[in-house]
Image (tube, rainbow, N blue to C red):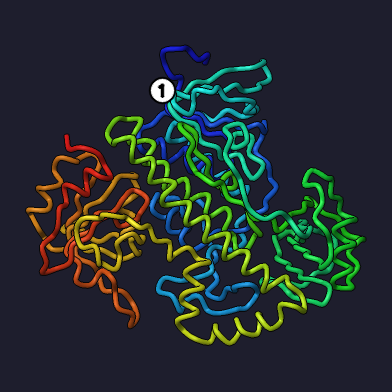
Amino acid sequence: MQGTDTAVDTDVIVVGAGPTGLMLAGELRLGGARVVVVEKLTEPTHQSRGLGFTARTMEVFDQRGLLPRWGSLETMPVGHFGGVQFDFTALPDGHFGARGVLQWRTEEVLEEWAGELGADIRRGWAFESIDDGFLDGDAVEVTLATADGPRRLRASYLVACDGSRSTVRKAAGFDFPGTPATRKMYLADVYGAELRPRYLGERLPGGMVMVGPLGDGVSRIIACPHGTPASDRDATVDYAEVADAWQAITGEDIHGGGATWVSSFTDATRQAAEYRRGRVFVAGDAAHIHLPAGGQGLSTGVQDAVNLGWKLASVVRGTARPELLDSYHAERHPVGRRLLMNTRAQGLVFLGGEASEPLRELFTELIEHDVVRRHLAGIVSHLDVHYDFEGAVGDAGHPLLGLRLPPRLLAEATGERGTPELLHAGRGVLLDLADDAGLRSAAAGWAGRVDVVSAQVKPADGDEPDPLSGTAALLVRPDGHVAWAASAGTAPGDLPAALERWFGPAD
């Protein structure tokens, strides 16, 4: 597949076949875009930094009908913020997310799904360089190293999903400011050692440790010793070094065991100053790195992909205006910034040693208040992600505008289904809850891009006020976020303007 000067080989090149890149590939194919995913590894790895995903990411997978592919998933009602435990069910639909899901399994599910949709995934192809025209040209051209020698690919857009040390981010000149690492920490999948579970971590005078059984006699351990300076990220870590750190913190000798995998990480915190430069985008760890806390890194990357995928597909198909792509940075950069804030705060509370005790005591007191539990649960679960749709038409004060459509059961003329099922096809949805023929007619020009669904909402469980109560209609984007709303008994606002903003001109 050699590039030419007059045509593109594909619509989008995605570099990196981790969860972010594979999710993006599936989203692009749902939207009708051609995509080539290039991955330097020749085979999928069975190493897993991530062991689950957040409540919102579970909803995202449910929106695409993917959850059954994992089989039975375990969720935890109790989670933590900086090691201070509390009940996440204080938040409606809240929980600590799916636990015990190995990252390699998530990648396997997403690669299978993207492949079924027609994504072209090329392993053993490593990104090397990018031509200068990506900033102001009409395409982007990259050079890739393959077993058969250098190859060139040309596309309309390029997305860096190649991790924290992204070669694409560096080649495209993205600034990556933040705070450098101050300490080195370890993780390993250990066998042959007697380890009791420490699911949410245990703080000891020498540091913090966590243990989570993975099955078959293997446990994931994390060891965060105090006073261990950060070192070169490329330095080799062996099991003996991990066992030394574990013994220094706990007094337990696990040197007689072994590990199927060992690694190290730091508390470095950085975020790309911009998520787009011309025809190049960054997503996932290529856009933001931080202290691991609650599976948020993988989950934020998946949500980056779901935000960007339908927009890129709409633009390359010519149904939406190119300006739509600017909303990716506008929406996701604040989310990434908030992610870095919350993980840094958790690090101070959890890993600060004796100096952090007053802060930890204060958090423990504050979490007794329901409003605080709701707030922190929303942050860590990602259920509180809110996009500021400046200049939105319709009911600008509606409580769901900019938030995700919550999971609810709908009663339609043909039966019942949940709101996530409305989004399986990756299209927008106009949810008509007032049997308004005028609104349905107004959306007719966007048929094929926006599905119109007339239904009644089944009452939610519990005593919480339902934000869908009193709602006449909602326009829901393919990523599940509410982009326009009309309240019952009020003028519905300019629905065609909202449809054109997010889905392009009517046919």
Type of amino acid at the residue the image marks with label 1 = Asp
Badge 1: how crowded within 10 Å, few (<14), some, or many (20+)? some
Q: Residue at x 50, y 44 (%)?
A: 274
Q: Is residue 304 above or below residue 420?
A: above
Report x, y in % for residue 382: 48, 63
Report x, y in % for residue 176: 61, 45
Instruction: Left or right? Give the position of 405 relative to 127.
Output: left
Using the image as rendered, state which of residue 324 and residue 404 is in the foreground. Answer: 324
Quadrant hosting residue 206? bottom right
Q: Look at the image and tell me in which quarter the C terminus lies.
A: top left
Q: Residue at x 46, y 54 (%)?
A: 67
Q: Residue at x 45, y 53 (%)?
A: 61
Instruction: Left or right? Give the position of 440 relative to 28.
Output: left
Q: Is residue 97 above or below residue 284?
A: below
Using the image as rendered, state which of residue 273 and residue 7 is in the foreground. Answer: 273
Mark 1 — residue?
138
Quadrant hosting residue 317? top left
Q: Is residue 90 above or below residue 291?
A: below
Q: Farthest left residue?
A: 438
Label 1 SS: loop
Residue 62 visible, this orientation: yes
Instruction: Left or right? Give the position of 143 relative to 378.
Output: right
Quadrant hosting residue 17? top right
Report x, y in % for residue 343: 61, 64
Residue 119 visible, this orientation: no
Report x, y in % for residue 75: 53, 67
Q: Residue at x 67, y 55 (%)?
A: 179
